[in-house]
Amino acid sequence: MGHYYQPEIETMSREDLKALQSERLVAQVKHVWENVPCYRAKMEAAGITPDDIRDVTDLRKLPFTTKDDLRENYPDGVRGMPLEDCVRIQSTSGTTGKRVVAYYTLEDIDLWEDCCARAITAAGGTRGDVCQVSYGYGLFTGGPGLNGGSHKVGCLTVPTSSGNTERQIMFIRDLNTTILCCTPSYAAYLGESMKEMGMTPEQIPLKAGIFGAEAWSDEMRRDVEKTLGIEAFDIYGLTELSGPGVSWECSEHNGMHICEDHFIPEIIDPETGEALPDGEVGELVFTAITKKAYPIIRYRTRDLCRITHEPCACGRTHARMSRLLGRTDDMLIIRGVNVFPSQIETVLIQQGYAANYQIVVGRENNTDTLEVKVEMTPEMFTDNVGEITKLQSDLVAGLKSMLGLKAKVTLVEPKSIARSEGKAVRVIDNRKF
């Protein structure tokens, strides 16, 4: 059995959970109808009124919401509460188009922090732990969310934010940090840096890591766990819904538990919008049923994953989602083949490379090109042309087996690819569409 932050909710029967969701969904639909004109307009266009929504089985009658909808209503067209009742905004880190600005009431923040507290507790966090939050703060939701969740659990919270690796390591050592919260790519970098300083996993006080904000593979998980001497836990969230804590792993590591008392999940066919059954890969859709300042109805996340409602051995009853398998909008189509960076990462780590690489896509003579620049580890670095050629050939073969197409592989010196203290920049697409 696992550790619970709110056991009465986390182990609630499916029947009771469905009744709670239905009650909250009905109230939320009425709320957006009365307070968010853009939602009311979408519902009217679909011929739907609040009276048509009686329980969760009616959810699919409601129209979808997309990021374009949110951007078109920038800055406050989706705000569902008077400005005087809102106490904070968070914003997406997108680089194109208008940002999404999400509003929060005090209650919204309180409920969000409860979700993050559940994640920290599921990772073994208690009042006796030191939780170092190395996600970015400010407009990015990672830092504020885990910071608040750590406070609720009662951990000593170290709000380092991202960057300044030397200081990060100093606090981990001097304050005996036991739980690290950051992106998986930055966790890998911290582990690599501590290894170079001569620190062994036994000398690192960390026991657990809560990593999210970017996709990562099981191979990368094992690599980070080995380097830092920790148990790694996945966490998922997005600004549009609240931030991290929408779902998270328990000690069973068999999918991330969705906080279904706050977020109703669906899996749909990304092409048709039709619902898919448990176990099938599709696009993840969420409806936030408790957030009032920025209510989100049937939001298409563009994230691809599977969902299961099968009971978990930890005792929790909420549905679980797999780790992300890609994104419908970040997926690369190269010479007609669907390619996800996580597939390439899997091959690299299986063959002994560190998870620092870059994918460069181009077009020559109307044909797509794919180059994978891979950083060699210090142990494999050599100036022997024959050895390098053999390593590159092995990677080319591994990638072809995984992807079904041939990629050019360029091996580069250790530390020659720029490190990231936030989300890693994995893909450079130079094609002109």
Image (cartoon, rainbow, N blue to C red):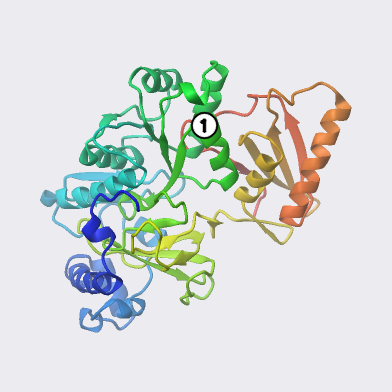
45 shown above or below 163? below
What residue is shown with label 1? 420
Q: Is residue 151 left or right of residue 218?
A: left
Q: How many marks?
A: 1
Farthest-out residue, right: 386
Q: Residues within 10 Å of mark 1 (few under 14, many from 20)?
A: some
- Residue at position x 31%, y 73% from top? 42
Q: Position of residue 90 (x, y in %)?
A: 29, 44
Q: Is residue 247 left or right of residue 421?
A: left
Q: Position of residue 219 (x, y in %)?
A: 60, 44
Q: Position of residue 263 (x, y in %)?
A: 31, 62
Please identify the quarter of the rendering in which residue 30 is found: bottom left
Q: On the rendered image, what quadrant is the C terminus found in?
A: bottom right
Please identify the quarter of the rendering in which residue 163 is found: top left
Q: Is residue 291 visible?
A: no
- Residue at position x 83%, y 40% from top? 393
Amino acid type at mark 1: Ser
Dot 1: element: loop
- Residue at position x 80%, y 41% from top? 394
23 shown above or below 147? below
121 shown above or below 206? below
Farthest-out residue, front: 1
Q: Is residue 22 visible?
A: yes
Farthest-out residue, left: 84
- Residues 229 and 152: in front is 229
Q: Position of residue 419 (x, y in %)?
A: 55, 29
60 shown above or below 354? below
Q: Is residue 395 left or right of residue 81?
A: right
